[in-house]
Structures are given as C-alpha cells and as structure tokens.
Image (cartoon, helix red, strand yellow):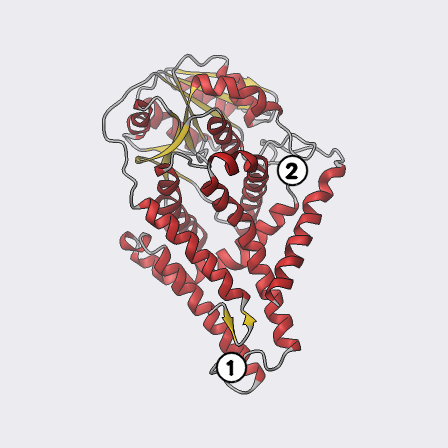
Amino acid sequence: MLVLSGRVYSFAALMAVIWGLWAIRALLARRYRPWLRSWSLPASVIIPVAGEEPELFAEVLRRIMAQQPHEILVVINGPLDPALAAVCDAAAGVTWTWTPVASKRNALSVALERATGDVAVIVDSDTVWTPTTLAELMKPFRDPDVGGVTTRQRIFWPRRSVLTRWADWLEAVRSEYALPAMSVLGTVGCLPGRTLAIRTQILRQAMPEFLTGRFLGIILEVSDDRTLTNLVLKAGYRTVYQSASLVYTDAPVKVGTLIRQQLRWARGSQYNTLRMLPWMTRHAPLLAVFYLADIVIPFMLVSSVVSWVTASWSTPDLYDSLPLPTVHWEAAVTLVTLAIVMTVLSISVRFGRHFAYAPADLLYLPAFTAINTLLLMPIRVAGFMRMAHDSGWGTRGGAGYAGTRRRNPQVIIPYALAVLLLAAAVRAGV
C-alpha cells in the first residue's frame, strides 16, 4: 500500500509508478505488428569508424556488402588508421574517406555530401547484420509519413559474462516493450544508432541543427542517434520500429567500460529529453511522460532509500502497524529482504518474455536486478548532473571524440536541479 496509518511509503509509491508505466507500454506493445509487404529504395549505408578492431570491421562490411545496398560510404575519423583503410580497400564496392576531426557527427556530414541514395542507413562500426536486415529495414518506408526506422538489436555471444547477459536481456526488454509501444504511436523517441535508417532529404535538412545545436551553452557530441530522431520527429515524420530487421552488436565485459558507456548514454538521453520536452508536450505527451519518468525514477529510487534510512532511524515505531519482528534491526532486515525479493519478482513478471527463449538467465535475475538498481540508477543521477559537461566518448580510447576542456559556467545548472529533485523527493518520502 502507498499509505498506511497515515504514512506514505515512498518505495511502494515508486513501484506503483513503475508498474503503471509498464502497463501502458505492455498494452500498446500488444497492438504492434511488423511491416510485411516488400518495399525497396536505394540505400546509402554510412559507417563512421574510429578505433575499431579490423577483423570485426571486415566482418561488418562483408555482411553489409552481401545485401547489395546502393552504396557503402565509410568515414574514418580521428587519427588515420592504416589497418581500417586496408580493410576498406579490400572490400569491393566500398567508398571510404578520412577526416582528421574525431567526431561521429562530422563523419556523418562528410558521408552525406557523397550519398546518392533515397535512404541513409547509419551503422555503427561494430554492428553485425543478419541476412535480411536491409530488406526488412526498407519495408516501413512504403508509408510516406515514415521518416526514420530502427531495427531489433541483440548482443552477440551474450553468455560470455554476467554483463553481456544483462545487456542482452536489456535489449530484449526494449525490443518487447518500449520500441513496439512507441512505434504503434509513430513516435519512437530514440532510433538506436547501431543501425537506423532516415530518408536522406530529412537528414540533409536536419544537418545544420544536428551539427550546431547547443544545450546549456555547449555543443554535445554524444547521443547523436537520439538527436537525429528528435529532428525527424520535429520535421513532422513518424519514427517506427521494424522487429523483423535484426542486428547484433557487442557489449562491455568490464565494469569500468560499462559505467563509462552508461554514463554517456545517461547524459545524452536526459539532455535530449529536456531539449525536446516542449515539442513532446505539444505533439507526443505520452512520449514526454515516458522520458520524464526515465529522469525522475532514479531520483525517486535514491530518495526512497535515503528517506527510509532517515525515517527508520528517527522513528522507531515507523512500521508498528505491519506484522514485523519487534526487534528494530530484525524488522529492518525483514523489510530490506522483502524489498529485494519483491523487486526481483516484479522484474521477472514485467519483463519475463526474454526468459521464454533464454530460461538459464532466470538464474541471473538477482544479478540483473542488482545491476539495474545499484549501478544503473546512480549512473542515471550522475548523468543528469553532468549534462553540461562536454565529455568524451569514453569507450574508444584515444581514437574517439575526447571532449573539450573549456570552462562552461552553466555546468552548475544540472547539479542544482539534481539537488532540488533529490531534496523534494526525500521530503515527499519522509
């Protein structure tokens, strides 16, 4: 219960919000159907690459070449990599160029100047296509109102570690709930950048803002896929998900790399939510609710823990109305255990479709829950605070975008907002 004997239990309120949002997504996702009728358009495949393993990149190109797109344009950005250049030279039909600017956004602009296809298919350099990826990806463009399409995405070799299993489960959750739900409404809020397709004319029109748009005084390199999706939506087109188009990608196997990746995603997602909020409020209010929840829920979780610790310490009779042990520490241990068990059960019920084809992952569900709760939620809060930092890519070593060291006085704004959010959430939960 949210309220018992006049007291508000913040963790129960948090779970009620999470369940409510899941129910909306689940109901919408039931209406989703993939596009089935064939449709073909000349596709320019654009691959920005920096610091990639040559063997993996060669396989990426081989899979794409087998599907015979209109053209394949590779842009090596940052330090010139002779090994990657050699891979491109050995791939018949691949046109490549080099730009010394270590920037994925600039690389897209360079490739777009040469693109001649009706659809630009942007592919990450570590994303491996399946035999029908391109053919399926083109089908939704039969609808002239569709401006952008994304694929179903999974992790290859997911059983390497707990982290890769978790990443594969997370992709399955997104593919089963969030993406189909928003696709039904034509407002997929982020076309994930592993492989996304956008009508070339829209991309050209969006490029000036894509390259120069600012947030809190700085141009941010991260979250290019979410930024492009925003620009497609603002241009008046629908963004959709094609579940029949499948790709595989890699996932971090080290905790440090995972943290840097998730921090980058958290920063990019949340700054794009705030930039896009006025448009979403007017044109896609449900999308606004989902993305605002992505910001607020981590703060609610952190504050519910803080408020519970504070209240249980200062109010010995806080849970006297519940059937708990009379000894204070025993009651606390019982409550924590129940919270953990209920959280694991909640996740297993809400996102259980994945376990139908990967039943062994049920054994890892407590670990998945721990990663989501103890790692992902604090990272989301930290990402919110660091939205105005022009940080680097974080997972490409010295080859990727490194950010800048310019001082930005507006960097304090997200920190101040985060403190206010945490304080308000803690006060509401006490």
x 37%, y 33%: residue:
240
Amino acid type indicated by mark 1: Ser
Q: Residues within 10 Å of mark 1 (few under 14, many from 20)?
A: few
Residue 137 horizontal side relative to residue 330, left or right: left
Mark 1 falls on what kind of element?
A: loop
Q: Using the image, determine if residue 244 lies above or below residue 368.
A: above
Real-space CA distance between mark 2 and mark 1, rounded to the nearest whole angstrom: 49 Å
Q: Using the image, determine if residue 82 lies above or below residue 194.
A: above
Residue 299 drawn at (x, y percent): 59, 55
The answer to whether marks 2 and 1 mark residues whose Cβ atoms lie closer than 8 Å is no
Q: Nearer the viewer, residue 46 or 188?
A: 188
> Which image quarter: residue 131?
top left
Mark 2 falls on what kind of element?
A: loop
Q: Which mark is residue 321?
A: 1
x 54%, y 18%: residue:
98
Nearer to us of marks 2 and 1 is 1
> Does residue 1 show up?
yes
Residue 150 drawn at (x, y percent): 39, 33
x 35%, y 25%: residue:
64
Which residue position is annotated with label 2? 391
Residue 83 drawn at (x, y percent): 49, 25
Q: Residues within 10 Å of mark 2 (few under 14, many from 20)?
A: some
Q: Earlier in the sequence, mark 2 or mark 1?
A: 1
